[in-house]
Image: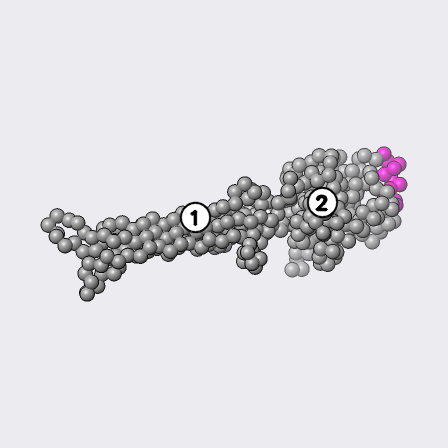
Amino acid sequence: MKFVDEVEIEVKAGKGGNGIASFRREKYIEFGGPDGGDGGDGGNVFLKGTRGLNTLADFRTKKKFDAQNGENGMSRNKTGKNGRDLDILVPLGTIVRNAESGVKISELIKDEQRLLVAKGGKHGFGNLRFKSSTNRAPRKFTKGDYGDELSLKLELRLLADAGFLGKPNAGKSSLMRAMTKAKPKVANYPFTTLNPSLGVVDIGYGESFVIADIPGLIEGAAEGVGLGTQFLKHLSRSNILLHVIDIESFVENVNINDLTSINKELQKFDDKLANKKQYLIFNKIDLLDNKKFEKKKEIILELYKEKDVFFTSAVGNIGIEDLKKKLFYEIKNHNDKL
């Protein structure tokens, strides 16, 4: 299954309705004047930022979007109805580009924000418009214009305060579920998370923050290995990176290399991303007995004494509340400085 964060769609605004040539036909009026009405304008196509949508996956099955055409004019100087506008709902954080040129058009970051991407065609004129003192019975009318038609590239970068990263199967989705009400797919095999998930962490007293769960990183991700560079883009908007490590499989030399290799992937992709604040979260501590846990904990705290280190169990709900509170105050301090 392909990880979807980029998609191309075709949008087509409505055609303007034609004007018509028509003349009054009434009893006892032998030479009725022109009464052809104008057409209606074609419908516009908008992209609309929508809170609650997290992925672009829905666009895999529907990629063509047409607004309604304007109706043609009618006799008795009746104007055709305008075509209905079309709103295409997209997640917040969606970047819109011209698919052919790659030029960025805009970015949708606010709920209910609407972006006009294809303007409907202008209506045509009926023959009544062309009546003059020298031409009392014009037969001229004009057709409506065609609406804009173009290909768009949509790119989603999640809007999250913090984002999980780590090797596949480190327990990121389980932590996401323990910390929030989100329900990402959880199973004991790599690449369980194929679409990004957003979750809201409720601290209480009306305070909350947003975290993102993305697919696991493997070496070579910056060059497209595994699920490619798509999910690295999602981390770029997170203020804090939550680096999750499976403590059960932690071996001193191996996991130093794991941490280093992932940070190298971030560096290759974007220097700013690599320099973001990181929490080291050693997960699945419930799988260790007390003796083994204390030994590994001692080694880890010595290795990473200058880092923010946490020990958690998503299944046992151990260390979750402390992590949430620390993360909340970190995010709050960051936002207060903006």
User: For this rendering, which residue is in front, 89 or 11?
Assistant: 11
The crowding category of the residue bearing disc 2, from other C-alpha atoms within 10 Å (few below 14, some 14 to 19, many at least 20), is: some
Residue 208: image location, x then y, percent: 64, 47
Residue 287 colored in magenta in the image? no
Q: CA distance from mark 2 to mark 1?
A: 38 Å
On the question of residue 303 being in view, the answer is yes
Residue 115: image location, x then y, percent: 50, 54
The N terminus: image quadrant: top right
| Label 2 or label 1, whichever comes before in sequence order | 1
Residue 274 vertical position relative to residue 299 in the rendered view, above or below: below
Q: Say which residue label 1 marks.
A: 67
The colour scheme applied to this rendered structure is one colour
- Overall secondary structure of the magenta stretch? helix
Q: Which mark is residue 226?
A: 2
Specify the amino acid type for callout 2.
Gly
Residue 335: image location, x then y, percent: 66, 56
On the question of residue 163 being in view, the answer is no
Specify the amino acid type for callout 1.
Ala
User: For this rendering, which residue is in front, 69 or 289?
Assistant: 69
Q: Which residues are magenta?
A: 289-299
Quick one: which residue is furthest to the bottom in this view? 134
Residue at horizontal 69 percent and vertical 45 percent from the top: 227
Q: Secondary structure at mark 2?
A: loop
